[in-house]
Amino acid sequence: MRNPKVLSALRDEITRKLNAAAALGVNVLIELAQSGPPQVRLSAAKELVDRGFGPVVSRTANLHAVSATSVETLLDQLEDAEAKGYPLEEGGG
């Protein structure tokens, strides 16, 4: 299983299947949000919003997270991410 061509083909196939499954899952959530019982519709709608925009975090939680992290720590994390080649968003969100 160390053949690069085989590994690449497997990775491509797995990615294709996961993308198809994710699309199917989103379609199911949309159907449930449109036609399920009220509690199911609410849960499906929350899941769709969380997947589209990320989970809603309270302002208090944000303040605690920011105040617990120093500027130096944030700069170190940024440098680590850049060194690892992670793409960084421009414009701050």
Image (cartoon, helix red, strand yellow):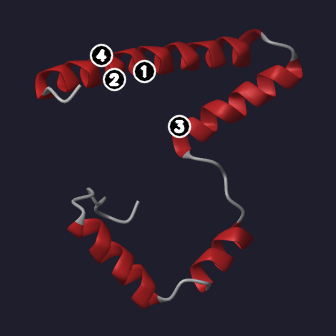
From mark 4 to mark 2, how far is it between C-alphas? 5 Å
Q: Please state if 47 lies on the left or on the right of 76 as rendered.
A: right
Q: Position of residue 70 (x, y in %)?
A: 50, 89
Between marks 2 and 3 in the image, the one whose residue lies nearer the viewer: 2
Q: Kindly report the distance in space between the C-alpha atoms of the residues bearing marks 2 and 3.
A: 20 Å
Q: Quadrant of residue 37?
A: top right
Q: Quadrant of residue 30?
A: top right
The residue type indicated by label 1 comes to Leu
* Callouts 1 and 3 close, C-beta under 8 Å: no
At numbered mark 1, what does the secondary structure look like: helix, strand or loop? helix
Q: Earlier in the sequence, mark 4 or mark 3?
A: 4
Q: x, y (%) of residue 92?
A: 37, 65
Crowdedness of circle 3 by 10 Å Cα count: few (<14), some, many (20+)?
Answer: few
Q: Position of residue 19 (x, y in %)?
A: 40, 20
Q: Residue at x 56, y 36 (%)?
A: 51
Q: Which residue is mark 2?
A: 15
> What is the distance, in whole Å, between disc 1 and disc 3 at their CAs?
17 Å
Q: Amino acid at mark 4?
A: Glu
Of marks 1 and 3, which one's residue comes earlier in the chain?
A: 1
Label annotation for residue 33: none
- Residue 18, disc: 1
The three-letter code of the residue at mark 2 reads Thr
Q: Quadrant of the C terminus?
A: bottom left
